């Protein structure tokens, strides 16, 4: 399934959804990536404050992958700064 993400709030929902769909708690995911449950909770609640590397690693461990798609290819308009 594809999850379009254009805002941090959408990324929050996707990260939680991926983790829960894999049947993992924040603590279990933290152990897999070498981080504490508290850090996983913080990344899920404020993904805009996490590094790209951390987000990419979490998504990979959860069996997802990051894809950048040109908005013009989908007929969408790019997100504006105000939407962030």
Image (tube, grey):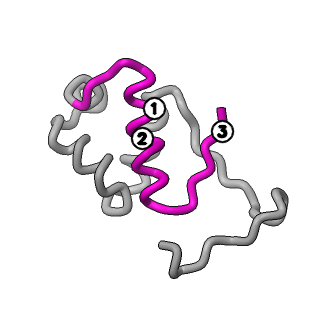
**Which comes sooner in the sequence, label 3 or label 1?**
3
Q: Residue 58 vs residue 4: left or right? A: left
Q: Residue at x 30, y 31 (%)?
A: 33
Residue 46: in magenta span: no
Residue picked out by circle 2 = 15
The answer to whether marks 1 and 2 mark residues whose Cβ atoms lie closer than 8 Å is: yes
| Spot occupied by residue 61 in the image (x, y as percentages of width and height) | 43, 29
Q: Is residue 34 above or below residue 79?
A: above
Q: Residues within 10 Å of mark 3 (few under 14, many from 20)?
A: few
Q: Residue 78 vs residue 5: left or right? A: right
Q: Residue at x 45, y 32 (%)?
A: 18
Label 1, secondary structure: give it: helix
Q: Is residue 78 above or below residue 10?
A: below
**Which comes sooner in the sequence, label 3 or label 2?**
3
Q: Residue at x 24, y 23 (%)?
A: 28
- Disc sitting over residue 2 in the figure: 3
| Spot occupied by residue 84 in the image (x, y as percentages of width and height) | 48, 72
| Quarter-of-image position of residue 36 | top left
The answer to whether marks 3 and 1 mark residues whose Cβ atoms lie closer than 8 Å is: no
Mark 1 and mark 2: Cα distance apart in space: 5 Å
- Disc sitting over residue 18 in the figure: 1
Mark 3 and mark 2: Cα distance apart in space: 13 Å
| Spot occupied by residue 64 in the image (x, y as percentages of width and height) | 54, 32
Q: Nearer the viewer, residue 69 or 18?
A: 18
Instruction: Assign the N terminus to one quadrant of the image.
Output: top right
Q: Is residue 65 above or below residue 42?
A: above
Mark 3 and mark 1: Cα distance apart in space: 11 Å
| Spot occupied by residue 5 in the image (x, y as percentages of width and height) | 57, 54
Q: Residue at x 29, y 28 (%)?
A: 29
Q: Looking at the image, which residue sits at the far bottom?
A: 82
The magenta segment is 1-26
Q: Looking at the image, which residue sits at the far top?
A: 23
């Amino acid at each position: 399934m594809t999850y379009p993400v254009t805002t941090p709030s959408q990324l929050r929902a996707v990260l939680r959804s991926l983790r829960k769909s894999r049947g993992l708690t924040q603590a279990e995911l933290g152990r897999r990536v070498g981080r504490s449950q508290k850090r996983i909770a913080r990344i899920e609640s404020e993904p805009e404050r996490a590094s790209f590397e951390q987000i990419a690693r979490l998504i990979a461990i959860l069996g997802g992958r990051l894809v950048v798609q040109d908005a013009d290819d989908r007929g969408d308009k790019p997100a504006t700064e105000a939407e962030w």
